[in-house]
Image: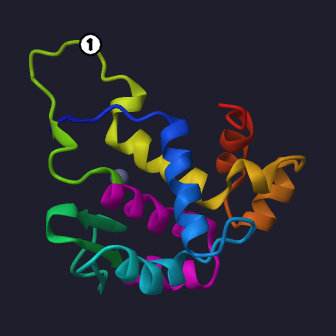
Amino acid sequence: MPQYIANPTSRKQIRDFTNMLRRLTGLYDEPYFPIVEFLELAMPKIFTSFEYEIVSTSEMPNEYGVTYPEKNKICIREDVYDRAIAGVERDRFTIAHEIGHFILHKPGNIALARSDLHQEIPAYRQPEWQANTFAGELLAPPQIISGLNKNEISSKCGVSLQVSEIQLKNINK
Ligand SMILES: [Zn+2]
């Protein structure tokens, strides 16, 4: 699998961006981020000509979601979409993750890593790390999780215990 390298982006930069999106939509202090409504209603308003498509499982058997930044498009598999509406943590995270790719990985922000780069790509330049960090920060930002334990974060924000732990660990970054 080719390795991709993205423009360096720190957790702090990603957090500034996700909180800007929360402010823009009046959701800065909202514990349970309505990720499906955000995809359907807010994204097309914020990003001109953005579109999303719900794709059948037979069309996309191996992926939960795919983002085509150059086509202004996010595809979400229908079972993921249905479970996200039902509040399943992992599927809510998947949609937030794809939105992260869409916003952070426009053409020009991302490239194939040079094959002669033998060093490991640092996390802050890895597209998957960036999209996961985006999702964690969008769904469970410091202003919401401050003072809560991981179980409270999980139930209030609709994220997994694992995501709650990562967000708690990085709350002061
Ligand atoms: Zn991804």
Q: Does residue 1 appear in the picture of this structure? A: no
Q: In the rendered structure, does residue 14 fall within the stretch colored magenta?
A: no
Q: In the displayed structure, would residue 28 be above or below residue 171? A: below
Tell which of 92 and 64 is nearer to you.
92
Instruction: Identify the image quadrant of residue 124.
Output: top left
- The percent coordinates of residue 42 (x first, y second) are 46, 80
| Residue at 27% across, 51% down | 105
**Total numbered labels placed on residues in the image:** 1
- Report the front residue among 144 and 135: 144
Numbered range of the magenta stretch: 78-103
Q: Quadrant of the N terminus?
A: top left
The answer to whether residue 153 of the structure is visible from this angle is yes
Up-down relation of residue 155 to residue 131 (above or below) = below
- Measured from the top left, where is residue 17 in percent x and y? 49, 52
Q: How far from the left and from the top, in percent, is residue 121?
A: 30, 23
Q: Quadrant of residue 72?
A: bottom left
Main SS of the magenta segment? helix
Relative depth, front residue between 168 and 30: 30
Residue 136 on image: x %, y %:
58, 52
Hey, which quadrant is residue 49 in on the image? bottom left
Magenta stretch contains residue 85:
yes
Report if the beta carbon of the residue with label 1 is closer than 8 angstroms to ligand 1: no
Name the residue at 86% across, 58% down.
152
The residue where tag 1 is placed is 119
Which residue extends farthest left?
A: 115
Q: Is residue 115 above or below residue 24?
A: above
Q: Residues within 10 Å of mark 1 (few under 14, many from 20)?
A: few
Identified by mark 1, the residue type is Gln
**Residue drawn 64% across the image and 75% down it:** 26
